[in-house]
Amino acid sequence: MRLVLLFIVAIVTSINLHAYSYAAAGKEPTIDSKEAILKSINDDDFQSAKTIFFKYKENYQYLSVEFNSLLFEGLKNAIDKKDKSAIVKWLNVSIASEIQRRLDGGLKNIKQFNIAKVMLAKANKFYKILSPSLSEETNKKLNQAIKKCIESIGNPGLFGVGAKPINIEEYQKNQEIAIKILKSL
């Protein structure tokens, strides 16, 4: 009995450590750069904004290639033109791209609950950053789609107790709704 209990504790502990290490991995360059660029343009320091943009160049290029082909050049041109409203728009597009990225990650890892859960928690984190810039109707629709994606990953429960099945079709349906909204920004 004692050996079985130790085995169960070892398994549960290793699962929790794996989930923790994945969740704690790295900073969020899109958030860090957005905050720094906004601070610079609020101080009318467009040279600093440009420096920050190029510091995070690889991140913006990645988001452009994978999620919004206009992002990199759009943000670069807005900074060059010192167009504050366009800069804010493109920074919001970068946050929208991160939401898409995390929703994609959630779907790719839907059968690995802990990873999918982290991906969707991060999608929700980025959504909360984007939310104040959205209209009430768009905000409500996007929030609902993300919540339905979260519900769709199911839950393995604790030793099967409270388990909820994965619903891939529901996830994909709501991911499409979210992506359509995010691409329209």
Image: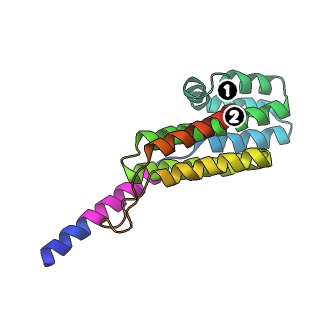
Does any portion of residue 21 appear in the rendered image? yes
Q: Residue at x 32, y 59 (%)?
A: 15
The residue drawn where x is 82% and y is 37% is 41
**Residue 28 screen position, x and y as percent:** 57, 44
Q: Of 126 and 32, which appears nearest the observer?
A: 126
Q: Which residue is mark 2?
A: 93
Place residue 158 in its image quadrant.
Answer: bottom left
Q: Colour scheme of this structure image? A: rainbow
Magenta residues, start to end: 11-23
Regarding mark 1 in the picture, which secondary structure is present there?
A: helix
For the residue carrying disc 1, how many other residues have a C-alpha within 10 Å: few (<14), some (14-19), or many (20+)?
Answer: many
> In this picture, is 83 found above or below 105?
above
What amino acid is found at the position of numbered circle 2 in the picture? Val
From the viewer's perspective, is 97 left or right of 17?
A: right
What secondary structure is marked by label 2? helix
The numbered dot on residue 71 is 1
Indicate the position of residue 125 as horizontal and vertical percent values.
61, 51
Estimate the x, y position of residue 30 in percent, counting from the top left.
Answer: 62, 40
Residue 8 belongs to magenta span: no
